[in-house]
Amino acid sequence: KLRRTVIVRAEGINPEIRKSEEKVVDSVDLTQLSKAVTPYCRCWRSKTFPLCDGSHVKHNKATGDNVGPLLLKKP
Ligand code: FES
């Protein structure tokens, strides 16, 4: 039987992005995207948040996690 251990750190999932805000919320108008496909960060490690900068690769290697970006496609 597969067992999975989930570790929840007291500081939460967001280590440093816009911590002064009560809630980090972003909105995207898909018709305004400049590229055909724009990757949005879901690992909370990007230096260009909310856009993905590839930092998830380092995060995944360090933690064994498997997170990746949300790809928004221009209609
Ligand atoms: Fe966070 Fe790519 S940097 S998903």
Image (cartoon, rainbow, N blue to C red):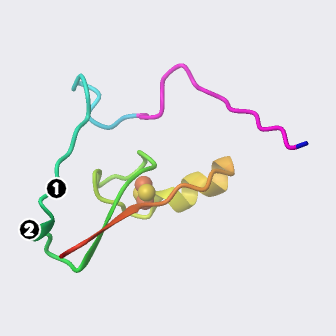
Give me the residue at 26% from left, 34% from top.
Answer: 24
Q: Residue furthest top?
A: 10
Q: Which SS type dominates the magenta stretch?
A: loop
As drawn, is 23 to the left or to the right of 52? left
Q: Is residue 21 magenta?
A: no
Q: Position of residue 53 (x, y in %)?
A: 37, 63
| Amino acid carrying mark 1 in the image | Val
As drawn, is 63 to the left or to the right of 19? right
Verify CB contact (< 8 Å) between mark 1 and mark 2: yes
Residue extent of the magenta highlight? 2-15
Quarter of the image containing the N terminus? top right
Give whichever of 53, 74 is nearer the camera. 74
Quarter of the image containing the C terminus? bottom left
In the image, residue 48 above or below residue 15: below
List the residue tagged with mark 1: 28
In the image, residue 57 above or below residue 42: below
Q: Residues within 10 Å of mark 2 (few under 14, many from 20)?
A: few
| Amino acid carrying mark 2 in the image | Gln
Q: Helix or strand or loop: what does disc 2 sit on?
A: helix
Q: Residue furthest bottom?
A: 36
Q: What is the CA distance from the residue labelled 1 to the residue labelled 2?
A: 8 Å
Q: Residues within 10 Å of mark 1 (few under 14, many from 20)?
A: few
Some atom of ligand 1 lies within 8 Å of the CB belonging to the residue at label 1: no
List the residue tagged with mark 2: 32
Q: Residue furthest left?
A: 32
